[in-house]
Amino acid sequence: MPAQRLGTLLVPVPGLSGTTYPPGTTVTVRGRGATVDAFVDGDWLPLAWWEFSDGLREDIADR
């Protein structure tokens, strides 16, 4: 299993389920590089490098 880490969405991103997650949402990230797989409660979000930040950012939703 690939290493997992936490990240924070920087922009709204739609998941495979059709739910759009707002900036500030915490995601579980797998992979490295220009695109990664991210998950929110089992919902898959294919992310580009500019759509998320590594780690948790409590203040991101306030911007």
Image: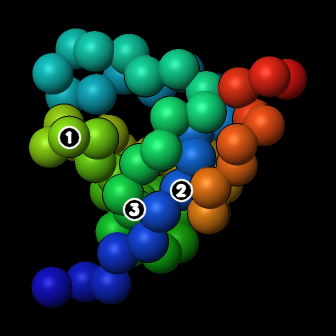
Instruction: Residue at 53% x, 72% y: name it.
Output: 33
Residue 25, given in percent of the width and then of the height, sits at: 50, 34
State the mark number for residue 41. Answer: 1
* Relative to 28, 52 lies left or right: right
Amino acid type, callout 3:
Val
Q: In which image quadrant can residue 41 be found? A: top left
Check disc 2 and report the residue beneath it: 7
Decide which of 25, 44 is in the foreground and name it: 25
Precedes in sequence: disc 3 or disc 1: 3
* Relative to 24, 36 lies left or right: left
Q: Quadrant where the C terminus lies?
A: top right
Instruction: Residue at 70% x, 42% y: name it.
Output: 58
State the mark number for residue 29. Answer: 3
Local packing at callout 1 (Cα closer than 10 Å; few below 14, some 14-19, many 20+) is: few
Disc 1 on helix, strand or loop? loop
Labels 2 & 3 near each other (Cβ < 8 A): yes
Amino acid type, callout 1:
Asp
Local packing at callout 3 (Cα closer than 10 Å; few below 14, some 14-19, many 20+) is: many
Disc 3 on helix, strand or loop? strand
Amino acid type, callout 2:
Gly
